[in-house]
Image (cartoon, rainbow, N blue to C red):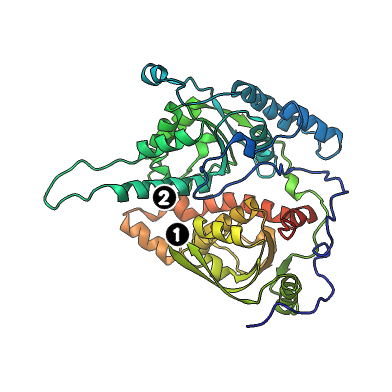
């Protein structure tokens, strides 16, 4: 095994060895990352947490805070953001001291908590939806509030369902028994842990999620849970062209009943505006000596680690995840290693919590024949971005050209169409076969990867000082 003691060359990423490089600079674009907001992405996202764990800054509320950031030149003024914040601030005032749990025995027996309506905020990528929700969240004064990536929340829900099913006594052979429905008990558990749920990136791509959302959220809403969510999709377009969507559509009516819809769409992707770069972090496989260049970058970063370059094995829910090359908090992987294996959000969560820098090499052109791998890459980047993990990319094409739709289904899609007795013409309109959902979600991935190449992002992602 090679020791992580390679000599320091000319630093490819100039700020890696400069302490607090950006502390004296003004960040003139958004989204502004509210560092006091804790983010979750997977299991235990709803673990007990008090209001004191999220210390709000010394402003009167979200609008005052936003106005001050604009006055100081940290944010650009955006009337669309301010309009959404005005609605969220009203909800913040309404939620002051709110609890969805009864305060006495008699109220538990005879009355139900009256919950205010939440908000569903949608718009294009990079318009500041997450920023305004996080700003709202930081000022809400309630005993139980949780902010979580929606993908991680659903992962947690499925784990709870599995646990409850496992705890049930097994039915004896030959006996008929009513099947156990764990959705209501899971909703009961969650409602006891949170009276406010804030979801980032509300999206539905999995049929297993789609089939339980109506029952799950109907129970949560009836238990007085208030929901605020951000999404790139308007409610009517959720799970668009998904399998068995007719069974999903009733959820949309439930969502609209308990959440008001707000559009935040200024037409500007602030992540893609000119911002100081962090040096070259996106490479093409056609670049000369590119693998040697990435090897040197890895060695320069590894020099600061108190570890050796070696294989790593991570524990992911009683499974072993083997990674071929790592040193301390630096991981060096290929695309196939991360996205061509049956990995999911739980794996990427553990990676995000373990490493602060990830090299992803040899990303191919992502055609429709690679839509499963593309979906994993989207989930991976969501996890890394949400945890401020830094990335170095080596790909076969520029970022904007990396994902495209070709006109042909792969062999697996043809087999699945035949199995489901779906005609080719009808199947081409389904998201699972067309790649439309991946194409839509990849816009967010491109936007996020663009921000992940800025100095601001890389400095914030440095865990060596924490």
Would you say 230 lies left or right of 168 here?
Answer: right
| Residue 392 visible, this angle | yes
Measuring from the top left, give residue 304's x and y in whole percent: 75, 70
- Residue found farthest to the right: 24
Label 1 – label 2 distance at C-alpha = 10 Å
The relative height of residue 414 versus residue 271 in the rendered view (above or below) is below
Which residue is found at the position 30% from the left and 48% from the top?
167
Residue 304: mark: none
Where, quadrant-wise, is the N terminus in this rendering?
A: bottom right
Measuring from the top left, give residue 263's x and y in whole percent: 63, 32
Residue 159: mark: 2
Which residue is found at the position 33% from the left and 59% from the top?
418
Measuring from the top left, give residue 308's x and y in whole percent: 66, 76
- Residue found farthest to the bottom: 1
Reading the image, the residue beneath label 1 is 317
Look at the numbered disc 2 and give the secondary structure of its residue. Answer: helix
| Residue 405 visible, this angle | no
Label 2 near label 1: C-beta < 8 Å?
A: yes
């Amino acid at each position: 095994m090679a020791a992580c003691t390679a000599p320091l060359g000319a630093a490819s990423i100039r700020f890696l060895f400069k302490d607090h490089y950006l502390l004296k600079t003004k960040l003139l674009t958004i989204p502004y990352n509210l560092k006091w907001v804790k983010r979750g992405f997977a299991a235990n996202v709803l673990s007990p947490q008090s209001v004191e764990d999220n210390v709000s800054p010394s402003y009167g509320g979200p609008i005052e805070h936003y106005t001050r950031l604009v006055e100081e030149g940290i944010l650009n003024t955006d009337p669309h953001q301010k309009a959404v914040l005005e609605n969220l601030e009203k909800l913040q005032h309404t939620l002051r001291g709110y609890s969805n749990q009864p305060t006495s025995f008699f109220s538990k027996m005879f009355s139900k908590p009256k919950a205010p309506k939440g908000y569903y905020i949608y718009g294009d990528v990079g318009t500041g939806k997450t920023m305004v929700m996080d700003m709202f969240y930081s000022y809400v004064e309630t005993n139980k509030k949780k902010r979580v990536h929606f993908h991680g929340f659903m992962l947690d829900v499925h784990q709870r369902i599995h646990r409850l099913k496992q705890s049930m006594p097994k039915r004896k052979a030959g006996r008929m028994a009513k099947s156990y429905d764990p959705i209501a008990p899971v909703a009961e558990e969650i409602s006891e842990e949170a009276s406010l749920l804030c979801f980032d990136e509300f999206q539905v791509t999995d049929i297993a999620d789609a089939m339980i959302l109506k029952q799950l959220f109907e129970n949560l809403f009836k238990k007085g849970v208030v929901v605020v969510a951000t999404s790139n999709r308007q409610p009517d377009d959720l799970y668009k062209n998904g399998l068995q969507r007719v069974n999903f559509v009733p959820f949309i009516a439930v969502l609209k009943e308990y959440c008001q819809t707000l559009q935040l769409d200024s037409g500007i992707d602030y992540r893609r505006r000119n911002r100081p770069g962090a040096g070259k972090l996106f490479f093409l496989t056609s670049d000369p000596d590119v693998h040697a260049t990435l090897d040197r970058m890895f060695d320069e970063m590894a020099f600061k680690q108190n570890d050796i370059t070696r294989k790593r094995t991570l524990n992911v829910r009683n499974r072993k995840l083997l990674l071929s090359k790592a040193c301390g908090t630096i991981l060096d992987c290929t695309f196939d290693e991360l996205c061509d294996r049956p990995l999911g959000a739980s794996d990427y969560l553990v990676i995000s919590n373990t490493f602060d820098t990830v090299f992803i090499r040899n990303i191919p052109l992502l055609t429709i024949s690679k839509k499963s791998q593309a979906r994993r890459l989207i989930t991976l980047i969501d996890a890394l971005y949400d945890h401020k993990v830094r990335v170095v990319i080596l790909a076969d094409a520029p970022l904007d050209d990396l994902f495209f739709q070709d006109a042909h289904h792969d062999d697996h899609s043809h087999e699945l169409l035949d199995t489901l007795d779906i005609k080719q013409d009808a199947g081409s309109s389904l998201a699972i076969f067309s790649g439309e959902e991946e194409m839509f979600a990849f816009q967010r991935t491109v936007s996020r990867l663009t921000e992940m190449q800025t100095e601001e992002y890389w400095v914030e992602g440095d865990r060596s000082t924490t």
